[in-house]
Image (cartoon, helix red, strand yellow):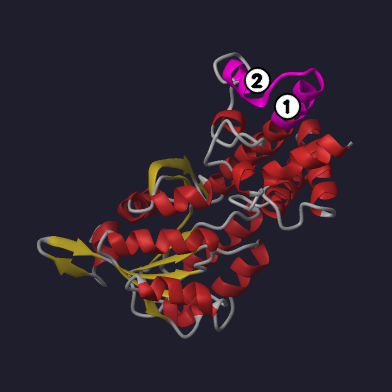
Amino acid sequence: MNALTQVLCQGFYIGKKKMAKIGFIGVGNMGGGMAINLLKAGHAVKVFDLSEAAVAVCVAEGATAAASASDAATDVGVVVTMLPKGKHVRSVYLGDEGVLNAANEGTLFIDCSTIDVATTREVAKVAQSKGMMIVDAPVSGGVGGANAGTLTFMVGGLKGAFEAALPILQAMGTNIVHTGGAGTGQAAKICNNMILGISMIGVCEAFVLAEKLGLEHQTMFDIVSTASGQCWSLTSYCPVPGPVPASPANNGYKPGFSAQNMLKDLHLSQDAADGFGASTELGKAAMEMYEAYVGGEGEEADFSGIVNMIRKK
């Protein structure tokens, strides 16, 4: 029995297509949209979250509410988790009440949380010792990508587990990359978001300087978006109102990707840099700037709102 067949043993048919029974733990801003896209693809999804309101949104779309995290992992072929921090992943996966004890042998676990590499590798080792398949599959694309099903997944784990996870991930994203063994998905996400934090600060500083030099926002955008300064932080997530209508700058900096989450990821990058002896001076500087922003006006804001702190300096 190959890995995909093993996962689908807990599934069911729609016409000639075999669908999976999936438990989804953590259906907040990101996880909710992801779970709904699994429902739209035809899968049966049982959801759990500490927020009853978040569960209710998914139930309204056809999901079943689970009584607990362990209940969400019971009698399903796949369990997807989207949790805030490493300590939450440890709590949900490990221990007598953890999902690894509640699930059937051979269950596929897909952890989409962004956490530290050490925790990911520890959980993977325990899962594999219990006869489970597991991948770490952190995402990029924000709430918009989660809702639209266009996320990028960076997937670490054994080849067989990746192959089993692929059709599930394809219901939630459009770019799915196998990065290597356990923990490499997290490594890729941490590095990516360090680049994002640094580049967003660079774009914000450039716009603030342009304002002082008398350049209009749209003029600045039109030039840089087609010149050598072009980057995602500018063209997809412009931190000033106007040029990119869908950016949080046009919605009062309401979080698509919160400054708190950016700070968490920058802390992960610096912990990894310290642990593995890498020099990341710009990453450290970005972390310190986001610490100042989150400690002040940015506690509930999008990470691009740091432009307001920079402007006030």
- Residue 288 at what x, y percent from top left? 84, 43
Q: Nearer the viewer, residue 189 or 211?
A: 211
Mark 1 and mark 2 residues within 8 Å of each other at the beta carbon: yes
**Does residue 240 appear left or right of residue 21 in this picture?**
right
Q: Residue at x 51, y 45 (%)?
A: 141
Query: What amino acid is at disc 2?
Result: Met
Range of residues picked out in magenta: 203-224
Horizontal side of residue 73 vs 293, given as left or right: left
Vertical placement of residue 161 versus 180, above or below: below
Instruction: Name the foreground residue: 21 vs 149.
Output: 149
Query: Residue 49 in the image: x percent, y percent?
Result: 52, 75
Q: Which residue is mark 2?
A: 220
Residue under label 1, please give it: 207
Q: Residue furthest right?
A: 313
Name the foreground residue: 214 vs 39: 214
Q: Earlier in the sequence, mark 1 or mark 2?
A: 1
Residue 237, quarter of the rendered image? top right
Query: Is 47 inside the magenta-drawn segment?
Result: no
